[in-house]
Image (tube, rainbow, N blue to C red):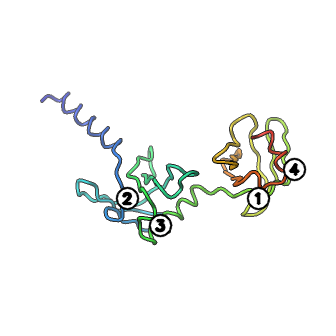
Amino acid sequence: MNSEDTLLDLQKKEVEDKIAIRKITKHNAEFYRTGGGFVGMRFTGEDNVTKTYDRIVVHRCFPFSDPTHYISIREPDGDGREIGIIEDLAALSEETVKMLEEQLSLRYFAPKIIKIKHIHDEYGYSYWDVITDKGSCRFTVRMGGSNVYAIGKNRYMVNDIDGNRFEIPDLYKLSAREIKQLDLFI
């Protein structure tokens, strides 16, 4: 075996490692809080080698349609390499679920719009004055893009110019006047 074959074998192993799907369960992973308010994890892979991650990042694979299943646990740095997948949060301990849900609520923070006071557009932007479940709010949305989009039946997500997200949980719970103001966007 020459050095070229060795290099190819190493590259193949690296690719296989990156694309492998690892299941994270209560039997092979232990989650813990870090001193800085983050979450860390000790994970024992199929090779029985335990690796400690001082900080992890938590993502939902299906954030709107299935928020408690298929939770991706990733490294926080670089390309956010996936460590593994939790198939169902309910299969973990109550304390672990609480830790992970706290992290998810930070990542997927999206106040729910319950009333639209006023929307007006000017120079390629729309200016929203709304009441959310977190209080009164004003924000700006760039026009012409896909910044207001459906995420379910009668359910919409609004992205403002600062990257914040706002949810309209049910379009038809708004008044006819409020829906008319949204005509430009939906």
Residue 139 position in % (x across, y down): 76, 50
Identify the disc placed on residue 114: 1
**How many C-alpha atoms fall within 10 Å of the one at disc 4: few (<14), some, or many (≥20)?**
few
- Residue at x 41%, y 66% (from the top left corner): 92
- Residue at x 54%, y 59% (from the top left corner): 104
In this picture, residue 60 sits left or right of residue 130: left
Judged by depth in the image, the label closer to the viewer, 1 or 2, is 1
**How many C-alpha atoms fall within 10 Å of the one at disc 3: few (<14), some, or many (≥20)?**
some
Question: Could you tell which of marks 3 and 4 lies nearer the N-terminus?
Answer: 3
Front residue (pair 170, 44): 170
The residue tagged 2 is 53
Element assignment for label 4: helix
Q: Looking at numbered disc 2 in the image, what kind of residue is underneath it?
A: Tyr
Element assignment for label 3: helix
Cα gap from disc 3 to disc 2, whole angstroms: 18 Å
Judged by depth in the image, the label closer to the viewer, 3 or 4, is 4
Residue 43 position in % (x across, y down): 33, 59
Cα gap from disc 1 to disc 2, whole angstroms: 40 Å
Cα gap from disc 4 to disc 2, whole angstroms: 51 Å
Residue 19 position in % (x across, y down): 35, 41
> What is the quadrant of residue 91 in the picture?
bottom left
Cα gap from disc 4 to disc 1, whole angstroms: 13 Å
Cα gap from disc 3 to disc 1, whole angstroms: 28 Å
Identify the disc placed on residue 97: 3
Cα gap from disc 3 to disc 4, whole angstroms: 41 Å
Identify the disc placed on residue 136: none
**How many C-alpha atoms fall within 10 Å of the one at disc 2: few (<14), some, or many (≥20)?**
some
Judged by depth in the image, the label closer to the viewer, 4 or 2, is 4
Q: Looking at numbered disc 3 in the image, what kind of residue is underneath it?
A: Val
Q: Looking at numbered disc 1 in the image, what kind of residue is underneath it?
A: Ile
Element assignment for label 1: strand
Question: Could you tell which of marks 3 and 1 lies nearer the N-terminus?
Answer: 3
